[in-house]
Amino acid sequence: MENYLKTLRFLLVLSNLIGACLFPQRSYGWGNLGHYNITAAAIQELPISMLTVFQSSSTWLQNNSLDSAVRSGWDPYESYFHGIHLGGTNTGTCQWPFDCMPQTIPEFLAQYGYTSIRFNGYIEDTILTYCLSTALVNWKTSPTLSNYTTVMTWMCRIAHYMEDLSQPLHTIYGYNPEIHSRYETNMLDRFTPPIAVTLNAYSYQTNIIKYAFSMISTSYPYWTVITSADFYAQNSAQSTSSDLYYTLLWSSTQSFTTTLLNLDAIYVASLWYTAWVNAGLDNVSVDDWKSYASDKPVNKP
């Protein structure tokens, strides 16, 4: 009975995650501009077979990647997927670079149980990639507008959550929400760092959780740099809203912020591509996809 209840609870969590894709609310992981630009670059990273299908709907993908699942006011299950919250007392003796964290879902559940999913949001990358693969199979079998929209919806969900992992303050346990907002939204809105497209940089991933952790391990250490940069900018500008404050914050964080934004576009494209391959679509010729690519998604999932 206990195992049954645990399984039922996990399925309820997963069903609410699916609901999040169908009825998303707006949230800010990298800020609107960050999510929009990473997703735009990720689309251009795709192999020609996928680009043929999805490029015509790129604006829809970009706009809907801004929608996340922060629905805590009415969905009690959301926090199990949205927050990463690694480090500190939350992960005990397992600290950065988190090599000791479980690398598969069964290992994770055996070590932490179902109640700890909330501070390991990376687990949804595997779930969502699986759901995208399933949606792609359904769409190929029945290429309707509804099935195409479902595919696009899962792509948006994967994009948003993977993009969150590259934001250092979105991975740390007990981050300062005010610094988080100033860094990821206000600063990026002012300086609009470009994201370069690195063709053919995408890759197929056999272990999505391990892949997600490689991004976390890369981004996580910079939270201390951001915190120090904010402290310096505040004291120098005597403000957290002036042009001087944001200029100083940007000068201290520009290099690694730009690197993380560019790197994450490759990660998003790789997760999309992994789902594409798992759905058995990587050997379909480009010409065969042209009829599918004419479909357009609805305005909202």
Image (spheres, rainbow, N blue to C red):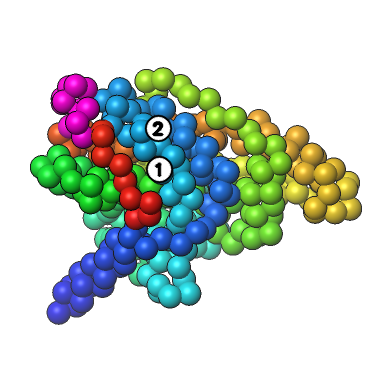
Q: Are marks 1 and 2 in contact (CB under 8 Å)?
A: yes
Residue at 37%, 20% (x, y): give it.
200
Q: Nearer the viewer, residue 210 or 132?
A: 132
Separation of disc 1 and disc 2 at Cα?
9 Å
Q: Position of residue 194 (x, y in %)?
A: 60, 30
Q: Locate residue 172, reporting x and y percent.
A: 55, 54
Q: Which corner quadrant holds the C terminus?
A: bottom left
Residue 143 is situated, as x and y percent measured from the top left of the image, at 16, 42
| Place of residue 273 in the rendered image (x, y in percent of width and height, measured from the top left) | 29, 33
Q: Is residue 31 magenta?
A: no
* Amino acid carrying mark 2 in the image: Ile
For residue 288, what is the image quadrant?
A: top left
Quarter of the image holding residue 140?
top left
How many circles with numbers are drawn on the protein? 2
**Which region is colored magenta?**
281-292
Residue 118 visible here: no
Task: For the N terminus, give its image quadrant.
Answer: bottom left
Provide the secondary structure element on which disc 2 rests.
helix
Bin the neighbour count of mark 2 within 10 Å (Cα to Cα): few under 14, some 14-19, many 20 and up: many
Q: At 53% across and 63% down in the image, what residue appears?
A: 89
101 to 292, vertically: above or below? below
Task: Find disc 1 in the rendering and name its residue.
Answer: 61
Q: Amino acid at mark 1?
A: Leu
As drawn, the label of residue 43 is 2
100 is higher (above) or lower (below) than 19: above
Which residue shows up at 45% across the image and 56% down it? 68
User: Would you call the spot at circle 1 few (<14 residues within 10 Å), some (14-19), or many (20 or more)?
Assistant: many
Left or right, 139 with respect to 234, comes to left
Name the foreground residue: 293 vs 153: 293
Q: What is the secondary structure assignment of the residue under circle 1? A: helix
